[in-house]
Amino acid sequence: MTNLEWQQRKEKVVANGMANMSPIYAATAKNALITDIEGNQYIDFAAGIAVNNTGHSHPQIVEAVKKQLDNFSHTCSMVTPYTSFVELAEKVVEIAPGPSAKKAAFLTTGAEAVENAVKIARAYTGRSGVLAFKGGFHGRTNLCMGLTGKVAPYKAGFGPFPNEIYHLPFPNAYHGVTEQQSLEALDDLFACDIEPSRVAAIIVEPIQGEGGFYQAPASWAKQLREVCDKHGIVLICDEIQTGYARTGKWFATEHLGIEPDLITMAKGMAGGFPLSGVVGKSEIMDAANPGGIGGTYAGSPLSCTAALEVIDIIRKENLCERAEHTGLLFKEQLLEMQKQIPQIGDIRQVGAMVAIELNDPHTQQPLAALTKQLVAASNQAGVILLSCGVKGNVIRFLPPLTIESDLVVKGLEIVKTQLKKLIA
């Protein structure tokens, strides 16, 4: 059967809300290449949305998970635990930034990590309010939708959302939002909407993912840290998309020079196996009562086994350094592309987290339709691309950190060719 025939079968039985970007049905995937059921090959600039940082089907992960599967697939970590869960906690506590003593908890999805981080913060502070940022993305559950600062497609039609969630402007120099304006909005919020003594947590992405790959300024992050310290507010850094060497550091927070109270993680943790976690200061992590956090599949033994291999691979294969090398190669190629294509209004790069923003060169209006067309055309031509941004005009590049340099150059040449065709 063809890709199109499978897509037609899907549309008959799968809910429209679980739409897929293109009718490309994967058959096999190795490192940075995906082969579909028709035998077509694609350069992967998406990595399953920053999940396969160690590449598709890394042999070290495959071998370890096969061995674990021979032993057992599930017992529930809260009923009869297993050693990989403990070993992984030891490793995660070790790589988490900052000098404070830390503990970890493991779950299944990024949204679960965010929900549990908020629960832990509320248990620790005895407060209920949570502050988040416009343009942020934190998941699709009801609480996480409330925290998310992007309506379409994540919040549209799904309200009402939990109360005592407030959104602040995220500093964004490219779009004219200064650090001072963001901090003044926080002061106004404390004066007009909720007193700081009722705020349990502030949650922020060090680099907004779905919002458009905008990096938080270090000076602003340090002032946010000071505000939290002053008022006893838990600072949660959502590192679900930015963690595990993606930005050239274990965690993007390291670029900001601050220590969060809690970090949420998922995506790149386990080489494609479903796993998420919260790591943070021990006294805060211990605030939840026994049984208050967890889940039936939380910290699956298969996923924990894979996650231990991921940490080993990142270290052995120097993936933090490779992320920076790959990102700079993307940036170099994209800067050359920008000279020929004025619709590329901005290029952003932190490690292998890279984006271009497409705007009308005369009016500076966002080119959302062009962005959507470019994703579809590139996919058709053999490159898996993703878009993002509150205004739908950002192309994000999230290749496996193990991608070969020649595939980066080849893939970007395809993207350039398709973009030139679309604007001709």
Image (spheres, rainbow, N blue to C red):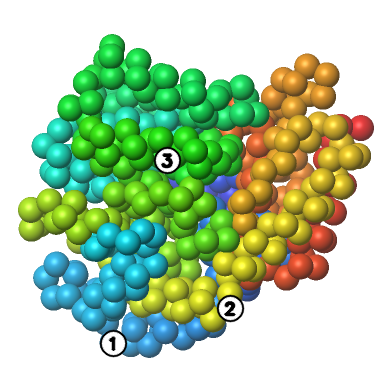
Q: Is residue 159 above or below residue 408?
A: above
- Depth check, mark 2 against mark 1: the one in front is 2
Q: Which mark is residue 318?
A: none
Numbered disc 3: secondary structure: helix
Q: Is residue 324 above or below residue 392?
A: below
Identify residue for label 1. Answer: 71
> In the rendered structure, which amino acid carries the disc numbered 1?
Asn
Q: Which mark is residue 222?
A: 3
At x 34% / y 49%, what residue is drawn?
260
The image position of residue 277, as x and y in percent, is: 32, 58
Q: Earlier in the sequence, mark 2 or mark 1?
A: 1
Which corner quadrant holds the C terminus? top right
One can see residue 42 in this view: no
One can see residue 393 in this view: yes
Identify residue for label 2. Answer: 317
The image position of residue 23, as x and y in percent, is: 64, 50
- Left or right relative to 301: residue 355: right
- Left or right relative to 33: residue 76: left
Number of residues whose C-alpha sits closer than 10 Å to that of mark 1, classed few (under 14), some (14–19) or many (20 or more): few
> In the rendered structure, which amino acid carries the disc numbered 2?
Glu
> In the rendered structure, which amino acid carries the disc numbered 3?
Lys
- Depth check, mark 3 against mark 2: the one in front is 3
**Callout count:** 3
